[in-house]
Amino acid sequence: MNIINIEHIAKIYEVGSEIVKALADVSLRIDKNEYVAIMGPSGSGKSTLMNILGCLDTPSRGIYNFEGFNVSEMDDNQLATIRNKKIGFVFQTFNLLPRSTALHNVELPLVYAGIAKAERLERAYKALENVGLSDRVEHKPNELSGGQRQRVAVARALVTNPSIILADEPTGNLDSKTGNDIMKLFQDLHEKGNTIILVTHEEEIALHANRIIRIRDGFVERDEIVKERTFLSGN
Amino acid sequence: MRNFLFELKEGLFISFRAIAANKGRSVLTTLGIVIGVWAVVTMSTAIKGIDNAFKTGVASLGSDNIYIDKWAWFNNDTPWWELRNRRDLTMEDYEKYRSLAKLPIAIAPTNWTRKQVKYGDNLLESVFLTATTSEFIKTTNLTFSDGRFFNELESNGGRAVAVLGSAIAEKLFPNGGAVGNIIDVSGKKLRVVGILEEQGSWVMGDFNPDNQIYFPLEFTFKNFIHRRESITINVRAANPQSVAEVEEEAIGIMRRVRSLKYNEENDFSINQQSGLLGEIDKTVGVIQIAGYFITGLSLFVGAIGIMNIMFVSVKERTKEIGIRKAIGAKRRTILGQFIAEASIICLIGGFIGLIFAVITGFVINQWLPTVVQFDAIILAVGISLLTGILSGFAPAYTAAKLDPVDALRYE
């Protein structure tokens, strides 16, 4: 079943008198329980594509269908609701609220979803437990290591049970060992049935996915199934 | 509705976190509102005190009194030259009125002069002296801290006796013990027979009994002025309800006494304390407007401070706003969060300002009896909440309409 269905979308910016085509013409489909890596050098338009996929931005042209909803026609509030309920973000720089505890950071999407306090705390606690941080719930981001911060971010992404997890260079700020831990976490999530979209410029990271979409100059350059996936074993 | 309350509650909670996280800045921001609310409430308290002082001052004249005079004290409908050209109101008029009037419980003719007064080395220039009869005391609510008012015998005989207001007594006799001593009024020797209790109505100026000296009218006729000089007749009604009847009777009698024809206008005026109250209300009203305007300005400056800080705060927390939006905060949620933040800062400031104002109120109370009014408290809370909402709105709106992509990228 399609979760994401994009048809001929383009994103055009006007910078002064100049017109910049960040995305020229992109069409793609992503199915449930796929693990997709979007790759491309900087300036290729992959960030723009990610913003559109994440409903942070809308395309200038074309149709974006998310689980049957026409996202390209939605207003700000509707987009916010989609982001809140359907998409879990994991960012390169973690993007946690610096002065809030891990638990509050994870709880926050549920606050915006209008869920009552008791249920919120229970679900946030469980999400942190699932990423192995049940003993760090009252710590603030600056009291956590990089890997732990990214786990909090993953817990925050998962707490609303979203349809897709959108990870933008999730290992970019981590050393290779903690990076591997995070990739193992994604692998486990994928095995549990989650749909993951990974944006990266590192071939090595992309090889964890089972499909790689290469973007160049605003077009899809290549869309291929990964034959030899990197598979992390261990706990 | 439930949804709205939920968002409000969560918004307030988020705002509290944000304020607690930026203590130093929040305190500085609050300061503007603290000072603003402090100023407004203290101002309203002081005005209340001034108003009270005026009103108690007027009340010390006696609310049941009318004053028959050649002059109209407050009413300016009659041109002053017409008043000046009226015949003087003399002792003869007083005596006729007195013999005909049935309703008043006390009637006293008075004449006011200013004289130099001294006792030993203590010299007072231009003291306000009320020359009157012994019945005068019955037209007032005055009480004595020492001695008594001059009696009928002393009054009719024009004896050299005097009753001092408390402030005069204090100045002439700093060590007390005035009664029985002889004071010098413009070269004439008068024996002090009584000291009035302090009335405390400083706003009345010379009319404040504290600053006056009372002595027999007959004495003044013997020594200072001619018998035919104009006087004022103080008339006291039995109670406030009968003041109107007493006034009506007085007009009738006075027209007869002055032999006015039916088509002639009154050539005298019936003055009342209520006229004075009207004047006072006008004066206090002006003070009030000026006061609120000036203190309102300080509050306005405080509000600008809040707006400024909120703009800085929005700028500084652009990334935070981006994160919140990415995980599903709607525009109105962000708008509410920042307005709530500004409002909470203002409310806290308002409460602190109010506490300062109450303390200041106690200090003011030392010399101007007053207390922070309940409506001033409502005013303070209302103003600070309103200030918060108004000064928070523009920054909050800026935050709410930030583009999530740009906000997330902001460093």
Image (cartoon, rainbow, N blue to C red):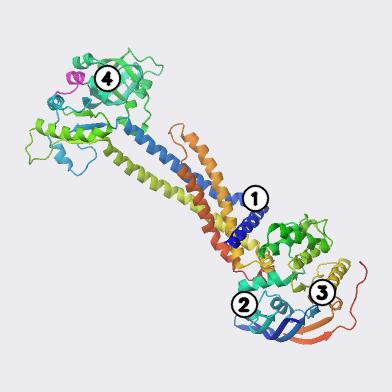
Q: Amino acid at mark 3?
A: Gly
Of marks 2 and 3, which one's residue comes earlier in the chain? 2
Q: Chain of mark 2?
A: A
Label 1 sits on residue: B24
Q: Which mark is residue A193?
A: 3
Residue B388 visible in image = yes
Q: Position of residue B95 (x, y in %)?
A: 14, 24
| CA–CA distance in space, label 2 to label 3 | 28 Å
Of marks 4 and 1, which one's residue comes earlier in the chain? 1
Outermost residue, top side? B180
Mark 1 burial class by Cα count in 10 Å: few <14, some 14-19, many 20+: few
Q: Amino acid at mark 1?
A: Gly
Label 2 sits on residue: A74
**Residue located 53% across and 53% down the image:** B385
| CA–CA distance in space, label 3 to label 1 | 48 Å
| CA–CA distance in space, label 2 to label 4 | 94 Å
| CA–CA distance in space, label 4 to label 3 | 109 Å
Q: Which residues are magenta?
A: B217-228
Residue B312 visible in image = no
